[in-house]
Image (cartoon, rainbow, N blue to C red):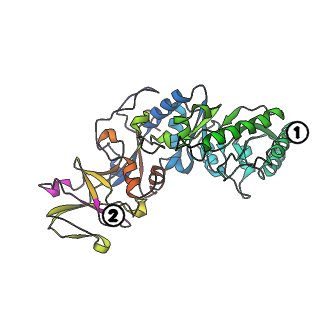
Amino acid sequence: MTGVTDRTETAGSPAPTPTDAAPAVDPRAAERSAVIDLAAIAHNVGALRARVAPAALMAVVKADAYGHGMLPVATAALDAGADWLGVAHVSEALTLRRAGIDAPVLAWLHTPGTDFAAAVGAGIDLGVSGWELEPIAAAAAAAGRTARVHLKIDTGLGRNGCTAEQWPGLVRAALEHEAAGRVRLVGVFSHLAVADEPDRPETDAQVAAFRAAVAVAEDAGARLEARHLANSPAILTRPDTHFDLVRAGVSLYGLSPLPGVTSADLGLAPAMTLRAAVANVKHVPAGQGVSYGLRYRTGAASALALVPLGYADGVPRIAADAPVLVGGHRHRVAGRIAMDQFVVDLVDPVPADPAALLGTDAVLFGDPATGAPAVEEWADAAQTINYEIVTHIGDRVPRVYRGDEAGR
């Protein structure tokens, strides 16, 4: 995999300021692509590390690195100074190991069918909420190895995690397995429910519950290496949650987890630009209906551009009126987004020569510093969050990497 490096920065430096509104792309993927700027990933790692030091940083690369590509992003994040990698599933962690990545990796979401033997053999740290402890210990005993586990306490989110009532028993069982050499109790962790709303009191309650759970473990004899609670919003707003390790998810990709706060406000650089080559352009009269249902009609004589991306590619069907940058001007999606394509009304200004735009880039979202629409504008149009927009971009959209000096 090759990349094009077109900007230079140091970790923790101000957010980069690209000069081109349409990033250069691999011509083999020129019809449509999600352009992933690995220099932006590196910048974000540096900016986040500067916020949380001396705590270590986990780069969360689950869900194919939030749609950005797990292996390139993991490598770029580690090269930039990330200390850990985090994934949901053991299968994701095993993919990292097969690629030769030997950094600490934590996987935390399991089922009875999870391949704990493979995880233990690959040296993957495993989250434990309760039932998982016994099959993990059995897998470790069978392999003659010691499994590394992090116990999860439910401090209020109500998903995974051990209840406060069962916590002393889980800690005791883990320490018994540790004494027998089957497991090493590496860490205690939890997850916050409302850290993206910094004024809500529930976060204070969760922090207090977490501290209490850690105290129970340490009083029982646990020698913890990693106490971790903070997700992206807590990294950015709650220094009291940083403890030994933080887990950077959406912020790693340069996206804000905080309503009303932009990436630029946080010193982060969005890493994904979604673009496609304009597939058709034509003059149309006033009153021209557009797309299924003819819910949209042109208000005056205009030109329509066809963009070859649709809901099969992860572009949300509901996002009518979302912004698109075409020919250096912001326009809007016109009518319903279809499976493979959507239409943009090139109005205000209407191009004098629409045919000249054939094959040029239509940029759905990217770094606003380049003039591109922000992904949050698409999230607003789709009545969702920026996380969902980037993670839904499908496999039919090639990922093209730039800012990759190592030529991975």
Quadrant of the image occupied by residue 263? top left
Principal SS element in the magenta part? loop
Residue 335 is one of the magenta-drawn residues: yes
Q: Quadrant of the N terminus?
A: top left
Circle 2 — which element?
Answer: loop
Q: Residue 283 occupies which quadrant of the picture?
A: bottom left
**The stretch drawn in magenta includes residue 123:** no
For the residue pair 173 and 396, the one nearer the viewer reads as 173
Residue lying at 15% horizontally and 54% vertically, measured from the top left: 351
**Label 2 Cα crowd, 10 Å radius (few <14 / some 14-19 / many 20+):** some
Amino acid of disc 2:
Gln
Mark 1 nearby-residue class (10 Å; few <14, some 14–19, many ≥20): few
Q: Residue at position x 72%, y 53% from top?
A: 115
Q: Position of residue 286 (x, y in %)?
A: 15, 67
Q: Is residue 171 left or right of residue 84?
A: right
To which residue does mark 1 refer?
180
The residue carrying mark 2 is: 341
Q: Nearer the viewer, residue 67 or 269?
A: 269
| Label 1 or label 2, whichever comes before in sequence order | 1
**Cα distance in 3D space between marks 1 and 2:** 60 Å
Residue type marked 1: Ala
- Range drawn in magenta: 333-359
**Image mark count:** 2
Residue 282 at x, y = what percent? Answer: 18, 63
* For residue 138, side relative to residue 405 (left or right): right
Q: Which mark is residue 58?
A: none
Which secondary structure, mark 1?
loop
Q: Is residue 183 above or below residue 318?
A: above
Q: In the picture provided, is 302 more to the left or to the right than 386?
A: left
For image coordinates 33% across by 63% down, the residue present is: 341
Q: Residue at x 28, y 39 (%)?
A: 20
